[in-house]
C-alpha cells in the first residue's frame, strides 16, 4: 500500500495515521513502524525502511513527513519516484503533508495516477455540524444544534481547536448531559469575530436595538472602540469582495481562496452582503473610513462614532450624515453619558 495524506485538517490526518498504527500490535510497534523526515529523505533510506520484513506482524508501516513539500526536482527525487513501484506489499508507505503540497511534482503525479491520494480539507457547514454531533456522542453528551453553530462562530472550523473545546464542554455537563448555547458562552472564549459578525448582522438587518445592545456588550467585555471600528470596516471590505466575486458566479470555496479567507467567513459575509445593494454597501464602507479618520484626528470619540453609525445605518432611508462634529463631541442620540 502507498498513500498520500494531505490537507488543512491536521486532526483528521493525525487520527487517520493513528488508525493505521493501531493495525500493528502495540508491543511490536517500535519494530514495525518507521518515521522518516521528508526534508532530508534519500532514496536508499526510504528503500531500507520499506524493504525490511515485518517482525512477527503481517505488515510494516513507514511514514514520510513533508517530502512532497521539501524535495526539490533533481536526481534524488527521481530516484525516490523510481523506487515507489517496488515497495513490497508487506509495507504500508504513507506520505504525510500539510495543506501546502507541490501538485506538479513527479511524486504527486505518480500517487495521483495510482489513486493513492487522500485529501483532508477543512470541514464546513452541515458536514462540520454532523462531525461535531458525532464527536459529542462519542463523549457521551448531546450537542444542541444551535450550540454547535455558536461553537463554530466562536472557534472557527479548525478541527483540533473544536475538539478541545467540545471535550471541555462535555466534561462540564458530564456523561449524559446536554451542551447548549449557555454552556458555550460560559466556557468557550470568543475569538472576537463572532460578536462582530452578530453586530454587522444587526446593522445589515437595520435592527437598531439589537445593534446597540451588542455594541454595549462588546464595550462591557472590554473591547476597544478603535478595534471595533477596524473589525467592522474589515468585515465590510470582505462583504464587498465576496459580493463582487459572487456576482462573477464564483463558488464560496473559490472566493475563500481568492480572498485568503476561511470558507465559513466567506459564507457569513455572503449572507450579510445579500442584505445590502452594492451602492449602500459602498456608502457604508466610505462612512466607516470617514468615521475612523474622525476618531483618529479627535473630531469624534470612537464610541460615539460607532453609535452614530448604528443610527445612520438603521435609518430606513439609509442616509449618512457627513457633517463634521466638533473635536471630542459625542454625536447622536445614542451616545452614552
Image (cartoon, helix red, strand yellow):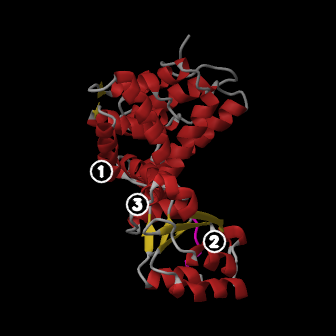
**Mark closer to the chain start, 1 or 3:** 1
* Dot in front, 1 or 2: 2
Decide whether the magenta segment is chiefly helix, strand or loop: loop
Q: Which residue is mark 1?
A: 126
Residue at horizontal 52 percent and vertical 84 percent from the top: 109
- Point out the stretch of residues depicted in magenta: 100-104
Q: Secondary structure at mark 1?
A: helix
Residue at horizontal 55 percent and vertical 83 percent from the top: 84
Q: Which residue is mark 2?
A: 67
The single residue placed furthest to the top in the displayed view is 337
Residue 267 colored in magenta in the image: no
Q: Secondary structure at mark 2?
A: helix
Residue 68 location, quadrant? bottom right
**Mark closer to the chain start, 2 or 3:** 2
The mark found on residue 189 in the picture is none
Q: Position of residue 66 (x, y in %)?
A: 62, 66
What separation in Å lies between label 1 and label 3 (alpha carbons)? Answer: 14 Å
Q: Which residue is mark 3?
A: 252
Residue at horizontal 41 percent and vertical 59 percent from the top: 23
Query: Is residue 119 in view from this perspective?
Result: yes
Amino acid at each position: 500500500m502507498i498513500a498520500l495524506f494531505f490537507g488543512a485538517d491536521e486532526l483528521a490526518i493525525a487520527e487517520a495515521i493513528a488508525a493505521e498504527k493501531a493495525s500493528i500490535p502495540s508491543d511490536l510497534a517500535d519494530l514495525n513502524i518507521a518515521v522518516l523526515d521528508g526534508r532530508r529523505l534519500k532514496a536508499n533510506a526510504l528503500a531500507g525502511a520499506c524493504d525490511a520484513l515485518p517482525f512477527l506482524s503481517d505488515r510494516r508501516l513507514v511514514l514520510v513527513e513533508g517530502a512532497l513539500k521539501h524535495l526539490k526536482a533533481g536526481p534524488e527525487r527521481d530516484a525516490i519516484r523510481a523506487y515507489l513501484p517496488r515497495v513490497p506489499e508487506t509495507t504500508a508507505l504513507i506520505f504525510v503533508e500539510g495543506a501546502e503540497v507541490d501538485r506538479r511534482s513527479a511524486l504527486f503525479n505518480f500517487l495521483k495516477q495510482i489513486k493513492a491520494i487522500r485529501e483532508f480539507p477543512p470541514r464546513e457547514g452541515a458536514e462540520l455540524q454532523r462531525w461535531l454531533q458525532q464527536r459529542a456522542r462519542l463523549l457521551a453528551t448531546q450537542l444542541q444544534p444551535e450550540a454547535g453553530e455558536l461553537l463554530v462562530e466562536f472557534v472557527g472550523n479548525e478541527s483540533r481547536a473544536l475538539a478541545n473545546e467540545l471535550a471541555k464542554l462535555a466534561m462540564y455537563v458530564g456523561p449524559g448531559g446536554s451542551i447548549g448555547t449557555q454552556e458555550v458562552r460560559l466556557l468557550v472564549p470568543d475569538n472576537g469575530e463572532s460578536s462582530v459578525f452578530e453586530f454587522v448582522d444587526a446593522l445589515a438587518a437595520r435592527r437598531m436595538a439589537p445593534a446597540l445592545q451588542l455594541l454595549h456588550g462588546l464595550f462591557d467585555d472590554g473591547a476597544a472602540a478603535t478595534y471595533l471600528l477596524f473589525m467592522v470596516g474589515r468585515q465590510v471590505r470582505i462583504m464587498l469582495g465576496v459580493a463582487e466575486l459572487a456576482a462573477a458566479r464564483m463558488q464560496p470555496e473559490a472566493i475563500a481562496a481568492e480572498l485568503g479567507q476561511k470558507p465559513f467567513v466567506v459564507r457569513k459575509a455572503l449572507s450579510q452582503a445579500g442584505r445590502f445593494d452594492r451602492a449602500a454597501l459602498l456608502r457604508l464602507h466610505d462612512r466607516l473610513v470617514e468615521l475612523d479618520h474622525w476618531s483618529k484626528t479627535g473630531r469624534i470619540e470612537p464610541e460615539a462614532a460607532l453609535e452614530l453609525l448604528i443610527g445612520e445605518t438603521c435609518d430606513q432611508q439609509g442616509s449618512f450624515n457627513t457633517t463634521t462634529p466638533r473635536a471630542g463631541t459625542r454625536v447622536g442620540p445614542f451616545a452614552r453619558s
